[in-house]
Amino acid sequence: MTTPTPEQRVAELGLVIPDYADPPYGERYGAMKPFHRSGRTLTLGGMTPEDRQGNKVFPGRVGATVTPEQGYAAARYTAVNVLGLIRFAVGSLDEVTSFVRTLCLVVTTPEFSDVNLVANGANDLFVEVFGDRVGRATSASVGVLSLSGGNVFEILTVVETRGAADS
């Protein structure tokens, strides 16, 4: 029995991956690019739990207006957005050979310290889609006071791909 590819796993999980080609990602945020490729390394810009129209999933602060479970769901939603940006950058999720690093930012009250449990919403999804060997990254989870647009979560992601960027 062969192991399903990441694209097959996405279909099995019923995930709806956003298309970041139309309109192009990032234009409403100012002077930024959606990703950077150097050799086989793909670095993605910060992703948040927003749909393509800018509607936010569970905006607010974990420990005040957002429960840890809602924060986990927002992180998971963000991870699906990351999958869309990977597709936009390299054409297929099957091109990813390793998740290198994730930096997860969670808006919290000062006393909330379980930021890793919220960030697991994203990191768990990557393992579900890519498997334990490819989907597990080095990761840091940081509680912050605010994020752009009132979002509760943001992730910065670095992955390795099969092919190198065109020169």
Image (spheres, rainbow, N blue to C red):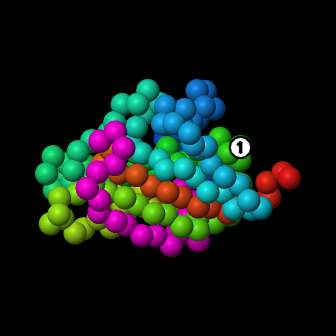
Q: Position of residue 22 (x, y in %)?
A: 61, 27
Looking at the picture, tell me which residue is in the foreground, 131 or 17.
17
Reply above or below: 162 against 48. Answer: below
The residue at 63%/66% (across/down) is: 98
Horizontal side of residue 164 vs 109, given as left or right: right
Instruction: State the extent of the magenta-drawn residues as a range.
Output: 129-150
Which residue position holds label 1? 91
Q: Judge whether residue 109 can be spotted in this image.
A: yes
The amino acid type found where label 1 is placed reads Gly
The residue at 23%/45% (across/down) is: 60
Looking at the picture, tell me which residue is in the foreground, 142 or 16.
142
Reply above or below: 59 against 102. Answer: above
Q: Position of residue 111 (x, y in %)?
A: 15, 66
Q: Is residue 141 magenta?
A: yes
The residue at 58%/26% (across/down) is: 23
The residue at 48%/36% (across/down) is: 29
- Element assignment for label 1: loop
Q: Position of residue 117 (x, y in %)?
A: 30, 65
